Amino acid sequence: GFLHYMVDSCEFNSSKLNDIEYIYSHYYNKLEYIRFSSSVGKFVGYTEVGIKNAERLNNGPEVIARRAQKESYCLSNVGIDVESALTKS
């Protein structure tokens, strides 16, 4: 069969917004074909299909919505993770 999935992730060194990177990736059969990274600020394609989709997404409202995810998705979750880790160490 075929498998398509998306992954949202937050990479961080502290709970400060500047130390957080939001990454949103699309995979097809374990191959990442497109990614949005908050440090790049746009979608980047890694395959022929991914490049075409990145071009389309970067010219639409999707890129603006993904840029906002660093603050709305990561900031609160990272704060919870940091607080949880600090109370356990």
Image (cartoon, rainbow, N blue to C red):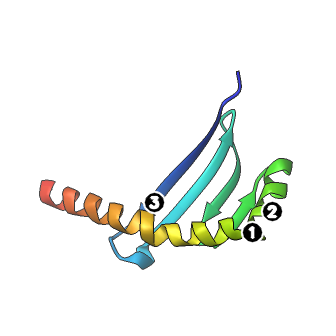
Q: Is residue 46 left or right of residue 6?
A: right
Q: Pointer 3: what residue?
A: 10
Q: Earlier in the sequence, mark 2 or mark 3?
A: 3
- Which quadrant holds the N terminus? top right
The reply to whether the C-beta atoms of the residues labelled 2 and 1 are less than 8 Å apart is yes
Question: What kind of element bears circle 2?
Answer: helix
* Residue 55: x %, y % from top left: 81, 64
Q: Can you tell which of label 2 and label 3 is closer to the viewer?
A: 2
Label 2 to label 1: alpha-carbon separation: 7 Å
- The residue positioned 59% from the left and 45% from the top of the image is 6
Q: Pointer 2: what residue?
A: 56
* Residue 69: x %, y % from top left: 50, 66
Q: Is residue 24 left or right of residue 17?
A: right
Q: Earlier in the sequence, mark 3 or mark 1?
A: 3
Q: Is residue 68 left or right of residue 17?
A: right
Label 2 to label 3: alpha-carbon separation: 24 Å
Q: Pointer 1: what residue?
A: 60
Question: What kind of element bears circle 3?
Answer: strand
Q: Can you tell which of label 3 and label 1 is closer to the viewer?
A: 1
Question: What kind of element bears circle 1?
Answer: loop
The count of marks equals 3
Quadrant in the picture for residue 57: bottom right
Identify the amino acid type marked 1. Gly
